[in-house]
Image (cartoon, grey):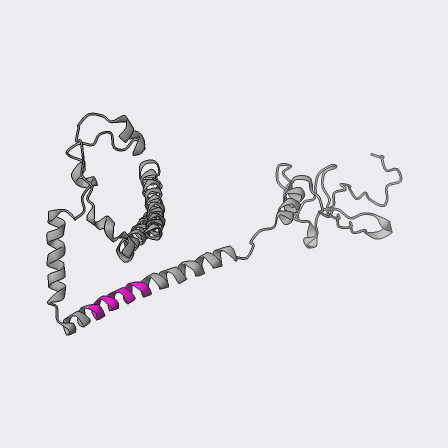
Amino acid sequence: MQRDEKQLEALLEAMIMRVNDLKNSIGSMLIKLEHEYETLNWPTFLDNFALMSGHLTSLSKLITTQDKLQPLRNYAVLPLLLSPDRDEDLLRLTEGRVPAFSHDLVPDYLRTKPEPEVERQTIQMEHKAANLAYESAQKQVTAYSKVVNHVWDIVSKAREEWETETGSRSGAAQTSSMSDTHLLVAAVGMGKGLKPMVQPPVPSGPQGMMVAPVGRPGAGPQQPGAGPMNPNQPGQMGPMGKAPSAIKTNIKAATQIHPYGR
């Protein structure tokens, strides 16, 4: 007798642990729904729901498979007092969620069977499943499996395309270089690395005299048959397609004795 009592106590402690795990998972779900409803996504919700379902299934197996818990099935929980008034002790035990043990809450908290509407629908589904022929059931299972496999293929293909696109984006070749950019800015702004322009040599005539087109003293080069050069125009090419010299001069007659003679 004493051994049976110890086993019953151990089973009760295991039940209490399962109930606490279920309570913690329910509390975590409620916190997410109340405070993280803006960022809560469907996969996270399903994970929490699966955790709650797992704890509930574990508790049900513990109750139904243990013969030592058979005496507990002979007991029923009945409310001793129903009151619409606020109960501070009940509010503390339920962490502020149940303010009163009223007539509206008792059927939900102490219900041992589903609601009548849910129970009626469940019985109809079970009766329909029991009367379904084996061949018809196999056809429906095959059709559902085909649909599920088709959806699975679509999702897998979309996932592969997404992973391929993401990998190609991350491994794209670099199209710019910071060092080249700095060199280009320094060359444009400060002329760094640029070679100076070399002025072409001026052709020389007989006796070492420089050759330039005849014109007014101080005037620039002129083309044959052209009038005086407009100082506002850009430099023009001289005879034979050569670039005009930057040195301006005149060719004097060889018979002159003094260069400043009139």
Q: Residue at x 33, y 40 (%)?
A: 27
Secondary structure mostly taken by the magenta-highlighted segment of the chain: helix
Quadrant in the picture for residue 131: bottom left
- The residue positioned farthest toward the bottom in the image shown: 135
Viewer-closest of 179 and 241: 179
Q: Quadrant of residue 164?
A: bottom left
Task: Work out which quarter of the rendered image holds the C terminus and state it.
Answer: top right
Q: Is residue 225 visible?
A: no
* Residue span colored magenta: 141-153
- Closer-to-camera residue (53/234): 53
Q: Position of residue 101 (x, y in %)?
A: 20, 32
In the shown orientation, is residue 68 left or right of residue 124? right
Is residue 146 on the magenta stretch?
yes
Point out residue 202 in the picture as x, y percentages from the top left corner. 78, 49
Report the side of 168 relative to 22 (left or right). right
Q: Of residues 136 and 130, which is closer to you in this image?
A: 130
Q: Position of residue 12 (x, y in %)?
A: 33, 47
Q: Nearer the viewer, residue 168 or 106?
A: 106
* Residue 43 is covered by the magenta coloring: no
